[in-house]
Amino acid sequence: MKRHALGGTGLEVSELGFGASPLGAVHGAFAESDGIEAVHTALDLGICFFDVSPYYGATLAETTLGKALRGVERSGYVLATKVGRYGDDDFDFSADRVRRSVRESLTRLGTDHLDLIQCHDIEFGDLDRIVHETLPALLELRDAGLVRAVGVTGYPLDALAYVAARVPVDTVLSYCQYTVQDRRLAGYAPRFAEHGAAVINASPLAMGALTDRGPALWHPASPAVLERCAAAAALCRARGADIARLAVQFAVATGGFASTVVGTSNAGEVRTAVQWSSELPDQELLRAVENCLAPVRDEGWTNGRPENQHPEPRP
């Protein structure tokens, strides 16, 4: 497993990251023992970057990940979690709450420090409050040694760019926007790098849209996007291929990001993802899928507050 520098943090992360949201049963019930085995398998195969949040499964994912990492040499992995989002409609970006959140996460994860703390889904908050209150509170925790790096996550790229231009964050995590269907993150990456932020790409499978199984009913993409993704999956099946395999290969091989995070909940999924990430995409198949997805290329959805989709400079 290749490793890349996480910007200027001094940390190195595996090019494939372990997305721990499934450990919170957000994609359906699972056995805790399977989740713990998945984490151990990831470590054995060279994955060292683990990304979680108290939001996933109402702290269940953090608790399970903490159990899995118990007894593992702390220097052997890079641990990232988040603050600010705690439920579907439960957001609190106040300085007091995020400080408490970090300490709560430390307890659940069984560690004395976090390698990366991220402000979660910033588009649901007041961006200026995040700039002037939330992130300064997290930077104080970095100075105190409780966290090593500070970042932001979210969906609207303009919201992430607005914040990254105003606060010296170490990382930006974007999801579903560097896939075979939507590649807008690539156009923003130089802007983030200009401000010193390393880019983490999450959900190259577009939250299940780029899989044979298909997405959950709650998926926010338009019917047109989901229909085209289903057609692309069928095209791959007809050629004896798996669109999920192509999607992982494409994101890892072409993105150039610090890490690409894929959600996994059992050892088999981890082994498969690691195998796929080591392969280059079939160029002929990729072109065929790109042609199929062309009518909905770079089409996403609205997420968060309306004013945060394309924030303008404010006094």
Image (spheres, grey):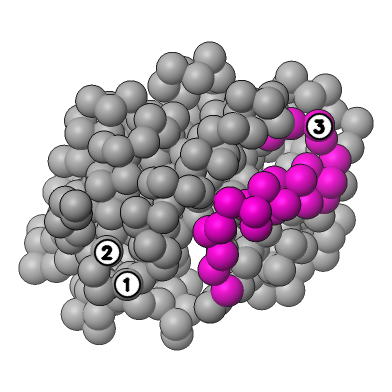
* Tag 3: amino acid: Asp
Contact (Cβ within 8 Å) of mark 2 with mark 1: yes
Q: In the shown orientation, is residue 17 left or right of residue 194?
A: right
Numbered tag placed on residue 224 in the rendering:
none
Task: Please say if 39 is above or below 208.
Answer: above
The image quadrant that residue 94 belongs to is: bottom right
Residue ID for mark 2: 308
Q: Nearer the viewer, residue 126 or 35?
A: 126
* Tag 2: amino acid: Asn
Instruction: Say which label, 1 or 3, has the lower sequence index.
Output: 3
Residue pictured at 57% horizontal, 39% vertical: 138
Residue ID for mark 3: 112
Image coords of residue 66 (percent x, y): 81, 45
* Tag 1: amino acid: Arg
Residue ID for mark 1: 305
Image coords of residue 51 (percent x, y): 60, 44
Q: In the shown orientation, is residue 13 left or right of residue 290?
A: right
User: Could one spot residue 49 in this view of the protein?
Assistant: no
Q: Nearer the viewer, residue 282 or 313?
A: 313
State which region is magenta.
90-115
The residue at the far front in this view is: 315
How many labels, in total?
A: 3
* Callout 1 crowding tier (Cα within 10 Å): few <14, some 14–19, many ≥20: few
Image coords of residue 59 (percent x, y): 74, 62
Residue pictured at 25% horizontal, 73% vertical: 306
The residue at the far right in this view is: 71
Q: In the shown orientation, is residue 264 left or right of residue 215?
A: right
Residue pictured at 86% horizontal, 56% vertical: 33
Task: Please say if 14 is above or below 53.
Answer: above
Is residue 112 part of the magenta span, yes or no? yes
